[in-house]
Image (cartoon, grey):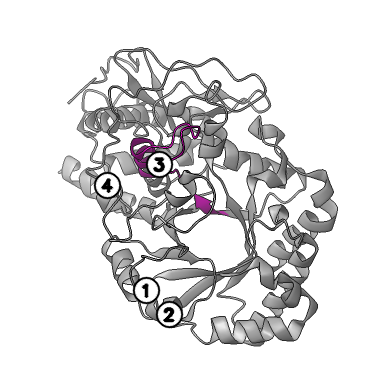
Amino acid sequence: MDRLFAFYFFLLLSSFIIADAGSIGVNYGRIANNLPSASKVVQLLKSQGIERVKVFDTDAAVLKALSGSGIKVTVDLPNELLFSAAKRPSFAFSWVQKNVAAYHPDTQIEAIGVGNEVFVDPHNTTKFLLPAMKNVHEALVKYNLHSSIKVSSPIALSALQNSYPSSAGSFRPELIEPVFKPMLSFLRQTGSFLMVNAYPFFAYESNTDVISLDYALFRENPGVVDAGNGLRYFSLFDAQIDAVFAALSALKYDDIRMVVTETGWPSKGDENENGASVENAAAYNGNLVRRILTGGGTPLRPKADLTVYLFALFNEDQKPGPTSERNYGLFYPNEEKVYNIPFTVEGLKNYHDHRSPVNRSPTVRAPVNGGGGVSKSTSGNTWCVANAEVGKEKLQRGLDYACGEGGADCRPIQRGATCYNPNTLEAHASFAFNSYYQKQSRAGGSCYFGGAAYVVTQPPRYGVCEFPTGY
């Protein structure tokens, strides 16, 4: 009876875990001449269980197709309209009326990105950003939509002056007073969030001598310790996001939430685009989905469950630039998957990061001037144990997930069983984490639990309990 009760108790708790976990969306770009119709795209999104989509404009056919779908939508006011939206409140009002109010709520628009990576726009539209955001928000207020639709603007990581180590993260000095402080104040006042585009691929591509591919792809690695705060990072993505959180903290805006509006990895690239391959793209996006949907924030913000939009839905054949730009798609235009990864918690149950034995990440030296490189683990047997530094709440959430939805064998840590003692959260979580890790064949990313776990190469010791090394 006790075991049956525990089983259902863990199942109940795991349902709360998933509800509190992060969310996955996709970017639906259309710079191509061979894409399926908008209505077919909506059916594709629904068939894959994708519940959020971000578009780069307000195309009428797309917004009509999304009507009644239940998919939450983020739309964009393009950079070329920033000047008009900033200088003329009437323009912003008309734009919201025509492109937002006309579709909402049947089309569940939840956010407006005003511009995109404005600070790197060659047309120097930075000075128009904040006035445009305010005018768009005021237009939403007039339609009484400001509570359900938030206004923000995606920034690139190039908006940071420092990003390594993460604890030293800071915004570019010339942007702080004229842009970031007033923009962050606006986000705070309106209950909105900061949109961030983060691409570990770019950092890895240009620093393969100092950044481990395993570290970039969420695979098993010994981690990198941030000398500034002592936190250990097991992925470049987390390190990049925490650099932005640190930059926010430096300006006393710790309360601002973050949404990762773009991240991805190309499945093909030019000869000099190191790391661009189908296998690496599948590993990055697949392991990222698992990382986000199993809950947990970053080492610096362990409670900050993230919403992340993968870039992009399709390969787009008319995008300019290097080959990689046309090969970020999760799907080909004929709707076939470029590689097979899940987008839902249910799909994660049978997901494994399949690594080619001839394409292993080489051993690399530690970073010289940043980059977050790690050395490749050369261990044989490995185990997964709890990271007590993240706190009891984080450990409990991970334990609940592992024993519930994760399918770990948690019978040995029930009262009276062989591994019940020592009766501590760290010991029980370690056993559960390791059971899940071993059942997943020690796949990359399966020993993470939102930063609450890490891999060790020596057998863990908690009382007389023996930790399994395989199932």
**Numbered disc in front, either 3 or 2:** 3
Which is more N-terminal, label 2 or label 1? 1
Left-right relation of 325 to 471: right
| Residue 271 part of the magenta-drawn span | yes
Give neighbour class at mark 2: few <14, some 14-19, many 20+ (Cα, 10 Å). few
In the image, residue 363 above or below residue 170: above
Give neighbour class at mark 4: few <14, some 14-19, many 20+ (Cα, 10 Å). few
Give neighbour class at mark 3: few <14, some 14-19, many 20+ (Cα, 10 Å). many
Task: Give the spatial CA distance, label 2 vs label 4.
Answer: 28 Å
Residue at numbered disc 4:
340
Q: How many numbered marks have been drawn onto this rendered protein structure?
A: 4
Which amino acid type is marked by label 3? Answer: Lys
Residue at numbered disc 1:
38
Left-right relation of 230 to 248: left
Which amino acid type is marked by label 2? Answer: Ala
The kind of secondary structure element at disc 2 is helix
Residue at numbered disc 2:
61
Give neighbour class at mark 1: few <14, some 14-19, many 20+ (Cα, 10 Å). some
Which is more N-terminal, label 3 or label 4? 3
Which is more N-terminal, label 4 or label 1? 1
Bounds of the magenta segment: 259-287
Left-right relation of 122 to 377: right
Residue at numbered disc 3:
268
Residue 377 image position (x, y, % from top left):
41, 16
Q: Residue at x 65, y 23 (%)?
A: 227
Q: Residue at x 54, y 14 (%)?
A: 365
Task: Give the spatial CA distance, label 1 vs label 4.
Answer: 22 Å
